[in-house]
Amino acid sequence: MQLSKTIDYSFMCDIQIENGMQLGNDHLGRDVCGNFSKAMSGVLSDKTKEYMKLVRFISIMSDGSTDSSVTEQESVLIYVHPETHAPVTALASIENLESATANTVYAAIKSKCGITLGNNEVEDQPKIACVNMDGAAVNMGAKNGVAKQINDQVNNKVIVMHCVAHKLELGILDAVKDVVYLKKIEDELKRICKFYSFSPKRGVELKKLSQNV
């Protein structure tokens, strides 16, 4: 799993110190951030496995991302409804991909989501009820998309859903194109973002400004 940018960790430590929290000097560095991230990911992974022991069915949600080193990744989440819990969305894994193809995404889900996709009747393992992804051809392709490959590998019929949030985003983007002042706001926000993100010096100045607010 790729670690989050350590600059975010350091920034959060600075904020907590400003709020009066006593963090000491031994847990603020880059290496410590990595150790904390690995420890937390292990705890979260164990918690996800425990959830999966309590349920008969799960839904898989998966989406691509690019980390700070411009590495292709796939975030795999599961949605469960334990008998003694409210519905829970849990992170199963964040996998590095050689390339964002249907086969590599499918392989990442198959190896890390904690179930055997080749046989959906394995004892003590939940069945896949639903797959939720964005509308990219890699995921939703009718012939070789990720959802199609998952559906072909399990015995029960899997419900394939086009992510509602992604559909809403596409609708909003289309609507904004026809509203002049919203388009102007979007352009200005992008300009501000580029102004600071492409210059370390400006980023430092912005951080100093935020500390004084």
Image (cartoon, grey):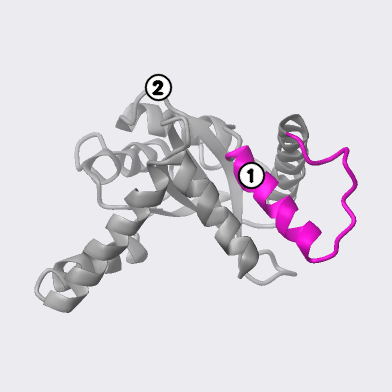
The location of residue 14, given as percent across then percent down, is 73, 53
The location of residue 126, given as percent across then percent down, is 60, 49
Residue 32 picture quarter: top right
User: What kind of element bears circle 1?
Assistant: loop
Left or right: residue 133 versus residue 107 is left
Residue 154 picture quarter: top left
| Mark sitting earlier along the chain (1/2) | 2
Range of the magenta residues?
5-29
| Residue 12 in magenta stretch | yes
Mark 2 and mark 1 in contact (Cβ < 8 Å)? Answer: no
Local crowd size for mark 1, using a 10 Å CA cut-off: few (<14), some (14–19), many (≥20): some
Q: Amino acid at mark 1?
A: Gln
Q: Residue at x 34, y 44 (%)?
A: 147
The location of residue 175, given as percent across then percent down, is 16, 73
Q: Which residue is mark 1?
A: 125
- Give the answer, above or below, for where 45 lies relative to 55: above
Q: Which numbered tag is attached to residue 98?
A: 2
Question: Toward the viewer: 209 or 19?
Answer: 209
